[in-house]
Image (cartoon, rainbow, N blue to C red):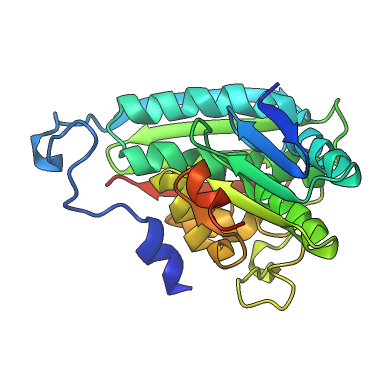
Amino acid sequence: MAIRRRSVRPQADAVDGTGRSPSARPAVPATVTSRQWALPSDVHEIEPVVREIVSLCRSAGFSDRQCGLNVPVAVTEALANAMLRGNRGEPGARVGLTVDISAAGLVVEVADQGAGFDLNAVEQSTAEADWFEREDGRGVFLMRALMDRVENACADGGAGHRLRLVLHRP
Amino acid sequence: MSFALERTDDLLSVTVDEQLVVSNRHEFKQAILDAVEQGARLVLVDFANAGYIDSSGLGALVSLSRRLREVGGDLRLIGLNDDLRALFELTRLDALFPLYATRADALAGR
């Protein structure tokens, strides 16, 4: 799916919305910020948190494209997937969210209380016959297209499911 | 309300003021479906003041487009910024929806 990389990955030498070249940006400390949330499985909880994450990214020097498209859409997909599929929309089931911003980039981890799924078994592609007809089934495609890396990260062996999104700095 | 509807005969103009996402997609879709049931056939959705769209929002647009085609109508999108255009190109849904810069462009030669 080369199209996803060509279309949305920030250009390494692009000038950002501030008019500064990347080399003119102030030095970024190794860890800029780290935040955690525990959310009920209510999709109305998503937007305020996404807004906060985008604000953190903007302050940390991520590009306009990353802050306007990559981050909000991919994080919304991960949270909605955890709430609606992982936790099956049960309001009492929680979704854990961790955001780390460092010199390397953004790492988002989303954990639900569901049984988990094999991310590698999910193949969503614009080449599918019903791509232009179906209503659902584009979330994993978007996360993969908008992030540099998307992976299962359920290393603790316990119940639940953890998804990790990684986005490099421009 | 994150969107507004204005109906004139068979033309329905929809202005999206915020995000079109999982939390408002059902309300958005149902409001337009209701208008289509009442006779709207050309639906213009204006994103000039909108934020981002997630897969749920895209899905609602795909579903509405299908419904409008079934009744001989059309769904046209207006005022997408560069980020939203990139999203439609990325998903190849720009092949499904005519994308117009302005309302006048979308109405030309209807």
Instruction: Say which quarter of the image contains residue A8.
Output: bottom left
Instruction: Say which quarter of the image contains residue A30.
Output: top left
| Residue A135 visible from this viewpoint | no
Quadrant that contains the C terminus of chain B: bottom right
Quadrant that contains the N terminus of chain B: top right
Query: Which residue is located at x 17 percent, y 43 percent?
Result: A15
Q: Is residue A50 above or below residue A4?
A: above
| Residue A24 visible from this viewpoint | yes
Q: Is residue A72 above or below residue A170?
A: above
Query: Which residue is located at x 38 percent, y 42 percent?
Result: A66
Residue A165 location in percent, x, y? 51, 48
Figure disc tally = 0
Query: Which residue is located at x 52 percent, y 55 percent?
Result: B99
Judge by depth and name the residue closer to the eye, B1 or A64: B1
Query: Which residue is located at x 67 percent, y 28 percent?
Result: B3
Residue placed furthest toward the right? B37
Residue placed furthest toward the left? A24
Q: Is residue B102 left or right of residue A112?
A: left
Judge by depth and name the residue closer to the eye, A31 or B97: B97
Residue B84 location in percent, x, y? 48, 47
Q: Is residue A94 left or right of residue A76?
A: right
Residue A108 location in percent, x, y? 51, 39
Judge by depth and name the residue closer to the eye, B14 or A55: B14
Residue A160 location in percent, x, y? 76, 44
